[in-house]
Image (tube, coloured by chain):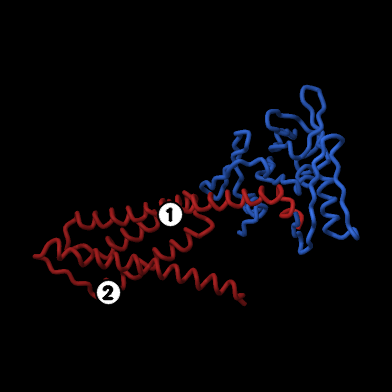
């Protein structure tokens, strides 16, 4: 039987997955429909089946992010794996289900490019996290050294 | 000055003297756990590590040790400006002086927390340590959690 903490971890994991999937879903749908503004002569509509495909793709990306980019395991390898996974899902769903068949080729390539750039921004997250951890480590070190050379910390 | 340790108030008096040896006098109604800890700390901090360099033997206080490294089954002690060899194993030094700030950072290295100048979190959950001597060491991923908890960071 699952303990309370495991349930909480699972719920928090699913919450993160849902949030990520939602952000990607909104981005995908926006990109799918915004073409009508770029080319007013065209008419873009999103049918239910395509929207379901987009939703599944976004959920897979969300699950991938939750499983690969764990809070305590952010590393170069994980970011690389996450990038490959997300691009693989995006391109295979888009090409496999012919999302952009009615659009010019440059449009789908731009779409992949934008998704790739958004994935690169994960590097920023890694950098911010390292900076924050560095600050936390040095604060703890100064506190340790300041408390009578760590005497009370070590012995209490 | 009055400090609180383990919920017990302790009065600390520092008296400056111009002649004679340094002396510590502990006044207590009974030898309770707090006083015993202080005694243990004093005893450990006064214990000296035996190390040798160029055939000459030296007695080092744990506070003089910056870091300890084991290479090819030999233990080397690094001070501010010297490297000495010790007959003690890394494991022995770690256990004996852990209360004095020596902490394991890798399979073959210990570092003295009191001589760390700064820390930097680096990729793959490792930590770069810069010592007051300018030397740089890396806390491996495996020991990063223990290292952080020694600094009071909850993982």
Quarter holding residue A51: bottom left
Front-most of residues A151 and A105: A151
Residue at the extreme left of the image, as rendered: A41
Q: Which of the image's four quarters has the N terminus of chain B?
A: bottom right
Residue drawn at point x = 61 percent, y = 59 percent? B155
For the residue labelled by badge 2, is the local secondary structure a helix, a strand or a loop? helix
Chain letter of the residue beneath label 2 in the structure image: A
Q: CA distance from mark 2 to mark 1?
A: 34 Å
Residue B58 or B124: which is nearer the viewer? B58
Residue behind mark 1? A125
Asked if residue B77 is positioned above or below residue A57 in the image, the reply reads: above
Q: Is residue A48 left or right of residue B146?
A: left
Q: Earlier in the sequence, mark 2 or mark 1?
A: 2
Q: Chain of mark 1?
A: A
- Chain B rendering hue: blue
Where residue B96 appears, as percent x and y from the top left, is 80, 45
Q: Secondary structure at mark 1?
A: helix
Q: Please give left or right for residue B72 compared with residue A109 in the image.
A: right
Q: For this rendering, which residue is in front, B113 or A82?
A: B113
Q: Which image quarter: residue B108?
A: top right
Residue A99 position, x and y percent, is: 24, 65
> Could you tell me residue B62's position as x and y percent?
76, 40
Instruction: Relative to B96, say whether A129 is above or below.
Output: below
Question: Which residue is located at x 85 percent, y 50 percent?
Answer: B39
Along the horizontal axis of the image, is A117 left or right of B26?
Answer: left
Residue at image coords 74%, 57%: B3
Vertical relation: A106 (above or below) A99: above
Q: Residue A49, labelled with which disc?
A: 2
Q: Say which chain is red.
A: A
* Nearest-to-viewer mark from 2 and 1: 1
Task: From the top left corner, tell me how far across and down residue A148 is, in percent.
Answer: 71, 49
């Amino acid at each position: 039987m699952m303990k309370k903490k495991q349930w909480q971890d699972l719920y928090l994991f699913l919450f993160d997955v849902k949030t990520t999937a939602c952000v990607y879903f909104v981005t995908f749908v926006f990109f799918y429909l915004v073409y009508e503004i770029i080319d007013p002569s065209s008419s873009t509509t999103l049918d239910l089946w395509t929207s379901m495909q987009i939703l599944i793709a976004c959920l897979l990306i969300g699950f991938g992010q939750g499983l690969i980019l764990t809070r305590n395991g952010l590393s170069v390898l994980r970011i690389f794996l996450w990038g490959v996974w997300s691009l693989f899902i995006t391109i295979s769903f888009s090409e496999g289900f012919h999302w952009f068949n009615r659009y010019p080729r440059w449009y789908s390539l731009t779409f992949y490019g934008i998704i790739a750039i958004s994935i690169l921004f994960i590097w920023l997250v890694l950098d911010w996290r390292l900076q924050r951890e560095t600050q936390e480590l040095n604060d703890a070190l100064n506190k340790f050294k300041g408390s009578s050379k760590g005497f009370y910390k070590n012995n209490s | 000055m009055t400090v609180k340790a383990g919920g017990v108030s302790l009065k600390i008096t520092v008296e400056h003297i111009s002649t004679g040896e340094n002396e510590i006098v502990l006044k207590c109604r009974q030898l309770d756990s707090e006083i015993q800890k202080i005694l243990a700390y004093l005893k450990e901090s006064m214990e000296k590590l035996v190390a040798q360099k160029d055939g000459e033997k030296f007695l080092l206080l744990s506070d003089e040790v910056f870091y300890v490294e084991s290479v090819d089954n030999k233990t080397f002690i690094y001070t501010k400006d010297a490297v000495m060899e010790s007959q003690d194993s890394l494991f022995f030094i770690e256990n004996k002086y852990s209360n004095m700030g020596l902490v394991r950072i890798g399979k073959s290295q210990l570092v003295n927390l009191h001589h760390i100048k700064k820390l930097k979190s680096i990729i793959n959950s490792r930590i770069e340590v810069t010592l007051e001597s300018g030397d740089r060491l890396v806390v491996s991923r495996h020991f990063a959690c223990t290292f952080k908890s020694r600094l009071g960071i909850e993982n």
